[in-house]
Image (cartoon, rainbow, N blue to C red):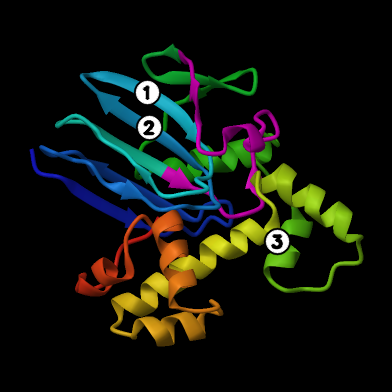
Amino acid sequence: METYFEGRGSDSPSIEAVWRGGAGQGYTPVCPASGQWHLLFLKRYDRLHISVQGPLTRATPVAQPEGTEWFGVTFPLGTFLPALSIQRLLDEQAFLPLASQTSFHLADSSWPIPDYENVETFIERLVRQHVLVSDPVVQAVLAHHPVEMSLRTIRRRFVLATGLPYKTIEQIERAKQATALLGQGVSLIDAAYQTGYADQSHLTRALKHFIGYTPALIARTQHGLTLR
């Protein structure tokens, strides 16, 4: 089996992206830091594992045995599951128990296992039953809209909805922007300047921490790195 990966967008405002893939021999990618969390359906050795993957605060190597297949859903910042503390899932995952061969448990209820094509229907049900919710304050701040609320309250809402303070989310997104620039052929010094890093060394440290690669390796990649 060869490694493959594909993804798509979604018309659902509660979904950032849907993706699926399979592991070939020697599959050992490095997942970059991400402020977003994911719902993952993974099949390994004919056994299904369903988990909530929390945000990654640093680049993290992963490995899957050959033949492992999966599909997942990435959620927008500010969309979360009240039944699970996203803050406790930073750099971690929580496995959801199976109820049967075709369903699993979440938020004290049993839910049918969706697939790559119909996952929007499943997510809509979660939203209708308030199992999946969105924080309008977090979304307003991310869209740079004014919010009449104290900074302390805004920080608390961010941590509740995303598990992360706004500053950390900014740091992750800035590293992704610099990675995209380097992949487009922008020089290290110009990428550092355009993304607001103090100097090239500052950018290099950030990329190693958040992306897991040096600027030189990123620049040598023809189209940059694909970031989830």
- Residue 160 x %, y %: 73, 43
213 relative position to 65: left or right: right
Residue 207 x, y percent position in the rendering: 41, 63
Q: Is residue 60 above or below residue 106?
A: below
Segment tinted magenta in the rendering? 73-98
Asked if the stretch drawn in magenta spans residue 83, the answer is yes
Magenta-drawn stretch contains 135: no
Q: Position of residue 176 (x, y in %)?
A: 45, 67
Most extreme residue toward the front is: 201
Q: Earlier in the sequence, mark 2 or mark 3?
A: 2
List the residue tagged with mark 1.
Answer: 49
Question: Helix, strand or loop at disc 1?
Answer: strand
Identity of the residue drawn at 40% across and 50% down: 18
Q: Residue 220 falls in which quadrant of the image? A: bottom left
* Three-letter code for the amino acid on which mark 1 is drawn: His
Q: CA distance from mark 1 to mark 2?
A: 6 Å
Q: Mark 1–mark 2 contact, CB under 8 Å?
A: yes
Disc 2: which residue: 41
Residue sitting at x 65%, y 30%: 84
Amino acid of disc 3: Gln
- Relative to 154, is 121 above or below? above
Q: Crowdedness of circle 2 by 10 Å Cα count: few (<14), some, many (20+)?
A: many
Q: CA distance from mark 2 to mark 3?
A: 27 Å
Q: Name the image quarter holding the N terminus.
A: top left
